[in-house]
Image: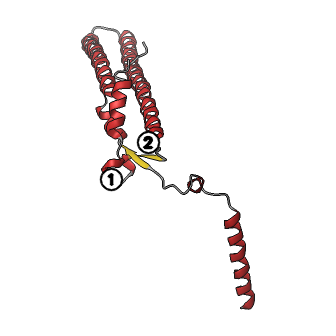
Amino acid sequence: MMRNIAGLAAAFCALALVAVAAPASPQAKRGGANPVIAVVDTQAIMQNAEAPKGIRSQIEKARNSYQQTIHGKEEELRKLDQDLAQQRSILSAEAFQQRQRDFQQKVADAQKDVQERSHKLETAFGGAMRKVEEAVFQIVDQIAKEQSLTLVVPRQSVIYAAADMDITAEVLKRLNSKLPSVNVTIPK
């Protein structure tokens, strides 16, 4: 029993020495200052800022154009399918099978084209939105330095924050000024 007490005492002494010898925390290095925290609602910024609205508008316009092209191809394929069905009784089995394979290849090509166009739209959208996100991070960094903030967290990760801790409006204002629009480049 005495050995256990002596062992515990030695362990506490060793722990106390480690605690005294440990380097100071970042907070202690700042002279004991309390952290200054702010929150920013990035979802609201991405929803309400001018640049993301413009990006979504450009993507929607390109999507509508693609859909018109796709609709035209669908109509062409429907007509080819109807023609093929009508020619079935006229054509030899071999000729019919060849035309059917040609038709199926056209359908496969159309599906591939739709997938490629969709991928291009997604890539263009992602690239343009990354430009906005980078600008938001730069603005948040600038505000943090100006206001001596030690931590900025996304609003979505916070259950409660006082209204004066929210820098969303200032970030939105600066973003609209710094980056009013982004040109979306869709690869051909």
Sort mark 1 into few (<14), some (14-19) or many (20+) by Cα contacts within 10 Å.
few
User: Quarter holding the N terminus?
Assistant: bottom right
C-alpha separation, residue under disc 1 versus residue under disc 2: 16 Å
Q: How many marks?
A: 2
35 to 57, vertically: above or below: below
* Quarter residue 166 falls in: top left
The disc labelled 2 sits on which kind of residue? Gln
Q: Is residue 25 left or right of residue 14?
A: left
Q: In the drawing, what numbered circle is on residue 162?
A: 1
161 to 185, vertically: above or below: below
Between 138 and 185, the one lying in front of the other is: 138
The disc labelled 1 sits on which kind of residue? Ala
136 to 90, vertically: above or below: below
* Quarter residue 167 falls in: top left
Residue beneath label 2, please? 147
Comes first in the chain, label 1 or label 2: 2
Seen at 28% across and 18% down, the residue is 61
